[in-house]
Image (cartoon, rainbow, N blue to C red):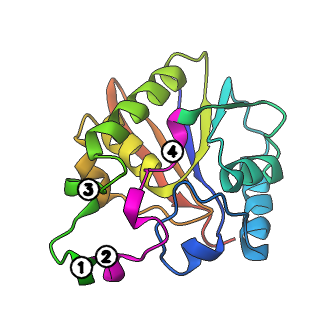
C-alpha cells in the first residue's frame, strides 16, 4: 500500500529559536542545509509518484537539496499555518499578552484558525492519496502535524500531539485498511 513521506524543512534562524514563522520567507541555516542534504541520502532510492512542496523558500530549499526539486509540484496548500499578528513571536512572548492562548485551539488574530489549516491539509492529502504510488510532501512543522491528524481522521487540534523536528521525516500509511503513522521523526540521528 502507498505511503506518504512528510518532510519538514531544515532549520532556519527562527525555527532554531522558537519563533513562529509562516509568511516570513527565511532561508535555511548552514545546519539546515546540511540536514536537507542528509535527507536526500535517507530518501535515496525512493520513487515517488508525486512530490508536493510548499512555495516558501525553506521548504523549496530543503526539497532541492534533498534531490527532489526538479520533480516537485509547488502548492499553496502546504504553506505554513498563517500566524497573523503572532508572526515572529515565540509562544512565551505571545502568552505575556494572552496567557491562555493555544495555537491548536485558538489560531491567530489576523491569521488562520485550525479549521482553515485543516481544509488546506485535506486538499493536499487528497492529491497525495490519489497519486499512483508513494508520495512526498516538503513543508513545515504545523501544517504537517495538522496533515497527520487529518490522515488519522482527527481534528486539526490533535496535531499538537505530533511534534516533528526540523529536518525530519514522518511516514503515513496503512495497516490493512486503517490509516496509521508508519514512522515519525526519522533521520534525526544522522
Q: Is 81 one of the magenta-colored residues?
A: yes
Q: Residue at x 83, y 45 (%)?
A: 67
x and y percentages locating residue 79 in the rendered image: 54, 44
Describe residue 15's horizontal placement relative to residue 67 as left or right.
left
**Is tag 1's residue or tag 4's residue first in the polypeptide sequence?**
1
Label 3 crowd (10 A; few <14 / some 14-19 / many >=20): some
**Is tag 1's residue or tag 3's residue first in the polypeptide sequence?**
1
Q: Which region of the structure is painted magenta?
A: 77-94
> Can the viewer see residue 174 in this picture?
no
Label disc, if present, on residue 171 of the rendered structure: 4
Label disc, if present, on residue 94 of the rendered structure: 2
Q: Nearer the viewer, mark 3 or mark 4?
A: 3
Describe residue 5's horizontal placement relative to residue 160 as left or right.
right
Q: Distance between the residues labelled 3 and 2?
A: 14 Å
Label 1 crowd (10 A; few <14 / some 14-19 / many >=20): few
Q: Nearer the viewer, mark 3 or mark 2?
A: 2
Name the residue carrying label 1: 97
**Is tag 3's residue or tag 4's residue first in the polypeptide sequence?**
3
Q: Quadrant of residue 163?
A: bottom left
Amino acid at each position: 500500500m502507498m505511503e506518504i513521506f512528510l518532510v519538514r524543512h531544515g532549520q532556519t534562524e527562527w525555527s532554531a529559536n522558537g519563533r513562529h514563522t509562516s509568511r516570513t520567507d527565511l532561508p535555511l541555516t548552514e545546519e539546515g542545509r546540511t540536514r536537507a542534504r542528509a535527507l536526500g541520502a535517507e530518501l535515496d532510492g525512493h520513487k515517488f509518484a508525486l512530490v508536493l512542496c510548499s512555495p516558501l523558500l525553506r521548504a523549496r530549499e530543503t526539497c532541492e537539496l534533498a534531490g527532489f526539486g526538479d520533480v516537485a509540484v509547488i502548492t499553496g496548500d502546504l504553506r505554513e499555518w498563517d500566524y497573523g499578528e503572532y508572526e515572529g513571536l515565540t509562544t512565551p512572548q505571545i502568552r505575556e499578552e494572552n496567557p491562555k492562548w493555544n495555537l491548536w485551539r485558538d489560531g491567530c488574530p489576523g491569521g488562520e484558525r485550525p479549521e482553515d489549516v485543516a481544509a488546506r491539509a485535506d486538499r493536499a492529502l487528497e492529491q497525495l492519496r490519489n497519486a499512483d504510488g508513494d508520495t512526498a510532501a516538503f513543508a513545515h512543522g504545523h501544517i504537517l502535524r495538522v496533515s497527520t491528524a487529518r490522515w488519522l481522521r482527527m481534528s486539526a487540534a490533535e496535531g499538537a500531539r505530533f511534534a516533528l523536528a526540523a529536518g525530519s521525516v514522518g511516514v503515513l500509511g496503512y495497516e490493512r485498511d486503517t490509516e496509521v503513522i508508519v514512522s515519525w521523526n526519522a533521520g534525526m540521528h544522522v
